Image: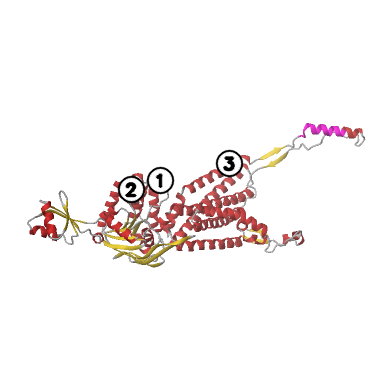
């Protein structure tokens, strides 16, 4: 089932005495149920606007948005109880305690009070729950925002930069939480700048530039679009292996303890060439692009 | 809807400003009641004797007049003044004081309701909690009306508390240190009706403030609009267009509280002497409480309608 479906969406912000700003340009986006879906893009690429449109906060100029199969905004009331969301900085009353802020939200949805304690416990805020939110650090506010999103026990969790302001331990906790939720069947739609995080936790990604989607698919598929074609090889005799591979027509760069083979379409051709000369590899590692380099290459190319 | 309304009432009453305003108002009321109780008495006073220099001057002038033969020699030259004691009645008379106290309490609650409702909706936009709330209840119309209902309910609840304290306190003072002569069940009913009309007035004020602050998405908008309207606009209109008096908010509020008031007719006579010449006192327009409620209701409908349209259509960013 498609939990998020955005088709042909346009959005332009008109501002007083300023030229109109196109935020989303004919965007198509599909997120299937299950797993963790990354939503990447440089600042101003339209990620948050897209999330706001999905949640019915911003109305698209054209196109259609569906959430859990229901059209937005008309069908939103039918599915909102199954959707948890954290958009940008969490927004709470600063003079209320963290607990009271959550209790007020829980009351709106008619959730039991123990759901508040459960969520606070989940994000490690139980000890500070009765402090005023204005005394919280940015990281604590972020945790409170995640707790609010989790209170509904959502089927779909939309997180916009959930690691903002968190320390390394907090970032790891959020990563583990997202993984745990993903493995428990919750679909997580994660917008983040932390590409390493996205690469570690996401199953699929969409990359957005200037309101347009420029890449989409599983993380492996996206990485494969920018495969390096390099293979690192270790053998007992590096120099001999280098001569053998060059003789087989390959481009090779020898180093002290390994050699790099370039433009390799299939790593099996390397092992085959060496084995035919009775040289056996002790290690063969295709060097893949990481998400950061792919992201930068794609976004710079699109810009 | 009930859960949303309950949450909104909880949110409204949990605000620090609301608690400070409520406690401060009750504390000030208690001080006023204590002060009134302390000065509620019947005092006996005697006129003071004239100063000595006046007595001396009078006697001197009198002697000179006698010497000139202007007054008979047998006439006394002392100043005559009334030295009889008289009573000053400063007691609280329940018959009038209860009504005055009820009116004053209504006006105070209306002012508080105006500030509280504007702050309530302004703070929601300022802190972005409106956006967070819409993740939980995306039906914006419901959100708007639940918040409006919360503003009205809390204002009325506070008004009820303040009226009970004011009424009971005033009656107690009148019974112990003043007089309850003339207090009948009919008077209580009349005052109760005044409280009910006050409730309508307070509700309208809270909703007007809520709609203005909501339209602009800031608290200051309602406060600024109120200042401009009451301090400038109404005075200008009353001076330049007296015939429009019947449409002014303060006149309609006065009509609601007083049941009816006299205002300028739609086309008042102009020019020097016009008032006297045309016997204006017989042509004044009677503004009734019903008319006041209708007029303010129309203003409120327009403002709330505008807020509804903007709130349900404008992006929340």
Q: Position of residue B135 (x, y in %)?
A: 38, 58
Quarter the C terminus of chain B occupies = bottom left
Q: Chain of mark 1?
A: A
* In this view, the mark in front (3 or 2): 2
Q: Position of residue A181 (x, y in %)?
A: 27, 55
* In this view, the mark in front (1 or 2): 2
Q: Regarding mark 1 in the picture, which secondary structure is present there? A: loop
Q: Secondary structure of the magenta portion, mostly?
A: helix
Cβ atoms at labels 1 and 2 below 8 Å apart: no
Residue B275 placement, left or right of A244: right
Q: Chain of mark 2?
A: A
Q: Earlier in the sequence, mark 1 or mark 2?
A: 1
Q: CA distance from mark 3 to mark 2?
A: 55 Å
What colour scheme was applied to this rendering of the protein? secondary structure
Q: Which residue is mark 3?
A: B34
Q: Quadrant of residue B193?
A: bottom right
Q: Regarding mark 3 in the picture, which secondary structure is present there? A: helix
Q: Which residue is mark 2?
A: A166
């Amino acid at each position: 089932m498609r939990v998020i479906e955005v088709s042909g969406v346009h959005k332009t912000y008109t501002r007083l005495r300023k030229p109109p700003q196109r935020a989303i340009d004919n965007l198509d986006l599909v997120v299937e149920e299950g797993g963790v879906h990354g939503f990447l893009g440089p600042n101003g690429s339209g990620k948050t606007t897209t999330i706001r449109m999905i949640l019915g906060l911003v109305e698209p100029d054209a196109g259609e948005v569906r959430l859990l199969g229901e059209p937005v905004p008309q069908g939103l009331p039918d599915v909102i109880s199954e959707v948890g969301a954290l958009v940008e900085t969490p927004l709470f009353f600063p003079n209320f305690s963290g607990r009271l802020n959550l209790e007020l939200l829980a009351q709106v949805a008619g959730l039991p009070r123990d759901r508040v304690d459960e969520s606070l416990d989940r994000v490690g805020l139980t000890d500070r729950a009765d402090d005023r939110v204005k005394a919280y650090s940015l990281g604590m506010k972020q945790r409170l925002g995640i707790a609010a999103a989790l209170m509904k026990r959502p089927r779909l969790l939309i997180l916009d930069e959930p690691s903002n302001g968190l320390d390394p331990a907090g970032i790891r906790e959020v990563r583990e939480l997202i993984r745990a939720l993903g493995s428990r069947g919750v679909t997580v739609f994660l917008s983040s700048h932390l590409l390493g995080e996205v690469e570690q936790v996401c199953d699929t990604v969409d990359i957005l530039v200037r309101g347009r989607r420029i890449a989409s698919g599983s993380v492996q598929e996206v990485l494969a679009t920018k495969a390096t074609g390099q293979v690192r090889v270790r053998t007992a005799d590096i120099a001999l292996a280098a001569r053998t591979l060059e003789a087989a027509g390959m481009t090779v760069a020898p180093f002290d303890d390994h050699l790099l083979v370039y433009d390799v379409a299939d790593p099996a051709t390397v092992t085959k060439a060496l084995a035919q000369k009775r040289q056996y590899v002790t290690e063969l590692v295709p060097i893949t692009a990481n998400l950061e380099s792919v992201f930068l290459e794609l976004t710079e190319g699109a810009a | 809807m009930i859960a949303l309304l309950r949450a909104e009432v909880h949110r409204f009453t949990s605000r620090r400003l609301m608690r400070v305003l409520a406690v401060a108002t009750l504390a000030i009321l208690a001080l006023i009641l204590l002060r009134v109780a302390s000065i509620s008495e019947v005092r006996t006073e005697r006129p003071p004797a004239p100063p000595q220099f006046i007595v001396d001057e009078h006697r001197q002038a009198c002697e000179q007049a006698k010497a000139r033969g202007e007054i008979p020699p047998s006439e006394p030259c002392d100043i005559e003044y009334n030295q009889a004691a008289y009573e000053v009645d400063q007691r609280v008379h329940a018959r009038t004081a209860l009504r005055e106290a009820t009116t004053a309490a209504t006006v105070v609650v209306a002012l508080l309701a105006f500030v509280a409702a504007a702050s309530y909706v302004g703070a929601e936009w300022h802190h972005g909690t409106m956006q967070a709330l819409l993740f939980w209840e995306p039906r914006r119309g419901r959100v708007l009306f639940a918040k409006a209902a919360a503003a009205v309910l809390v204002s009325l609840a506070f008004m009820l508390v303040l009226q009970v304290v004011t009424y009971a306190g005033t009656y107690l003072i009148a019974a112990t240190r003043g007089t309850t002569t003339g207090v009948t069940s009919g008077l209580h009913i009349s005052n109760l009706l005044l409280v009910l009309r006050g409730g309508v007035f307070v509700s309208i004020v809270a909703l007007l403030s809520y709609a203005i602050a909501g339209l602009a998405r800031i608290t200051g908008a309602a406060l600024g609009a109120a200042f401009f309207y009451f301090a400038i606009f109404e005075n200008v209109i009353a001076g330049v267009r007296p015939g429009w008096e019947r449409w002014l908010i303060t006149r309609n509020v006065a009509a609601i509280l007083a049941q009816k008031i006299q205002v300028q007719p739609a086309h008042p006579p102009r020019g020097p002497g016009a008032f006297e010449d045309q016997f204006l006192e017989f042509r004044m327009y009677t503004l009734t409480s019903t008319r006041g409620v209708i007029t303010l209701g129309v203003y409120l409908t327009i403002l709330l309608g505008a807020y509804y349209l903007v709130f349900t259509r404008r992006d929340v960013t």
